[in-house]
Amino acid sequence: MIKSQSSSRSKGGKRPSRGLSSRGTKKLPLPKDLLLQIHRLMVKSRALEDRLIKIYKAGESYFWIGGPGEEAFGVPLGLLVHKGQGPQYDWLHLHYRATPTLVAMGMPMIDSVRLMMNRATDVSTGGRNFSNHYCYPQWNVAPVSSPIEVQYSMALGTARVQQRHGTKGVSIVTGGDAGTAEGDFASCLVWASRPGQELPLLITVQNNGWGISTDYDSQHGEKHIADRGKAFGIKSLVMNGNDPVESYLKLKESLDYIRKTGKPVLLEALVSRLYGHSSASGANMEKGQVCCVQSFEEKLKKWGLLKDKEALAIRTEYETEAKMAQEQARQEPAPTPESVWDHVYAHNENGDWRNY
Amino acid sequence: MANMAQAVRMALHYGETHLDVVDIFGQDVGPPLGGVFTATQGLKTTWNTPLDERGIIGMAMGIALAGERCVAEIQFCDYIFNTIDLLKIAGNTCWVSNGNYSMPMVVMTPAGAGIHGSVYHSHSFDAWATRLAGWKVVMPSNPLDAYGLMLSAIADPNPVLYLKPKALLRVRGEDLIPGEPQDEKQLKSMIDAPLGDRRRWKPQWPELEDYRVPLGQAKITRSGEALTLVSYGRTLPICNKVADELLKEKGVAIEVIDLRSLIPYDWASVLSSARKTKRVIFVNEDTEVTNFGEHLAYRCTQELFYELLARPRVVAGKNLPGIGLHPHLEENSVPQIKDIRQAVLDTLAEVP
Ligand SMILES: Cc1ncc(C[n+]2csc(CCOP(=O)(O)OP(=O)(O)O)c2C)c(N)n1
């Protein structure tokens, strides 16, 4: 059964716990291979983001925003998604911190690097948009867009289609804590929970405790964002999003519940924001936070599943892959000026009035 | 000299201390950041709002209805679009209530391209704004005007939209703001928040003076007889540059008018200049279809049709759904210096 976690945050008081919960060492909480796979993917996602930041700092891109600190949430999500195109598969309405989810789904690193470097080969936006603004129609990944929270209302529509087709597909939406102040979040709760017309939605919030510079406690009267779901009879829970095991288990439980009942779940994951908001604030490691990759690695070592040397080798492997991706993307063509007119309309119908 | 962000900050300080401003608010407007472009650092009445643009505009309207003065910020004009029905109401309240209630409020928001802002930090809003009847709309092109327009906006009894050309916010002016110290390093040490922990920092404000740029008053920034360029905001200094180049290279004197105020606009200045030069081009970076420049060009054709030597033109942004990040895309989307120059040369070459 899904129930709300009570601990975590006392309003107006200290920051919620984003630490790893300690578990027994005897029995592994998940199969060994799965634990190691999650770890690998978390390291891969982090290595990729670190490379994106290097690209920014080297002046080869204009702006960086991304997901370091959200791997323990994003990777399990990506592994649990029913991936494919069409209403029988899950839909993803992600925001700009979803690299871990896409890495776990199988996105090649080079895709993210091309997007970061605005190459013509960038499959998500054709060199048009900021980093982490992914789009994968073959996996029902809706285009990430910068305006905060709009994905929470659009997710309603894909969920309705999934419901109409009687599929087990779920519409999954992600976003930050500050963004829940927008009306789209309220729309999402209201529309998802209409009696007898509930929608198969996994409504998630990655609560890192910050807007840009504005802290959670100064803007939220509610103790947990997840509490808002309760008023609508939505199954709601708060979890430690810095623990990939807890994330995996709670996400799985939520998705199973939605697939079974067709009803929504609101899941709030407490996560870290390791490098600040974006490159606008420097994109440097900010101390005093749990690093989920590091703490998971320590756990795996404690459980005897990983050795220092192996951890280092994994890290090096992905750092090298990311660096090579940058070198490759550098050689690739930039979008042409004329391409601004491409895809204004479907099937590349002319969009320039000069040619009407 | 102050840059435009500092000028806005000083104007808001003047507003707090002399013009009854009691609330300055928006996303990340208050401490610790003081605005994403630092335009609200160190002020007394700033505070951070939830991430909710409709709430921000509604809050401002309520404060205005209650008769108090506020300045609200939308972090980027790209994110103002979900408030458009509230903006309409703010614009029609005086009229629909038959004068019972006016809406004295200022909404400021950074606008336009030029900082590699990609799809959602490059929008313009001037063309949209000029369709919101009941609003006054201003857009400065330099720090002194930024200061003077803000004071006038605060004092005006109507809703005023104050568009900040984001690419010019860090550009220094050529004129001192009355009361501003001569030395820009001194100004910086007085009013710029230090990096890092600034919890105990307090600004030291200079003794600023009441300097206003009246709403509806343009300024001639280059005088000439050959052609008139009318612009505002980010494209204004580019027009100045075109005028300077052509004067130097070809001895052609172009007149440049900085509109400063879009609604109401200074028609007398435009009319007399266009009547003199007989060739006129309107330049801005919002998209070209139903662009504000088109209204001005239309009015020129109505009032000066038989006097002009060339068709009035509008140089504006291409009618695209967004501005792409790669410079190839951005530069082919909003007017560049070469585009303005070419339009000037073509218009000069036109024979009736
Ligand atoms: C509608 C809208 N308003 C403002 C912004 C500018 N902005 C970008 S990110 C951000 C803070 C978002 O905070 P949160 O929702 O908690 O997500 P986080 O970035 O912390 O993951 C703001 C204000 C925006 N992108 N969209």
Image (cartoon, coloured by chain):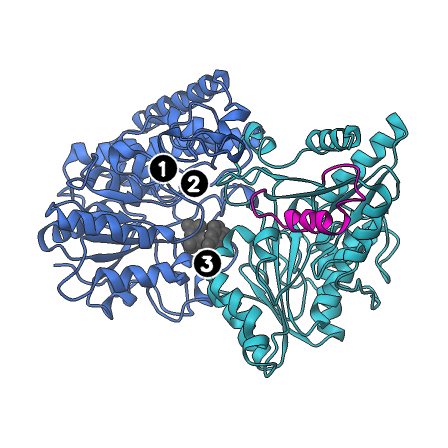
Q: Residue furthest front?
A: B306
Any mark on residue A66, and which? 2
Q: Looking at this view, is A200 or B135 the one in front?
A: B135
Q: What kind of residue is marked 3?
A: Asn
Q: Which chain is cyan?
A: B
Sequence-wise, which precedes: disc 1 or disc 2? Answer: 2
Whether residue A8 can be seen here? no
Q: Would residue B79 be found to the left or right of residue A236 on screen?
A: right
In the rendered image of this protein, does residue A350 appear above or below residue A152? above
Question: Which numbered dot is residue A339?
Answer: none
Give the residue type at disc 2: Gly
As for residue B110 lying within the magenta part, the answer is no
Mark 3 CB near ligand 1 (8 Å cut): yes
Both marks 3 and 1 on one chain? no
Q: Report the chain holding disc 2.
A: A
Label 1 close to label 2 by CB (< 8 Å): yes
**Amino acid at pointer 1:** Thr
Residue B82 image label: 3
In magenta, the rendered stretch is B288-311
Q: Which mark is residue A99?
A: 1
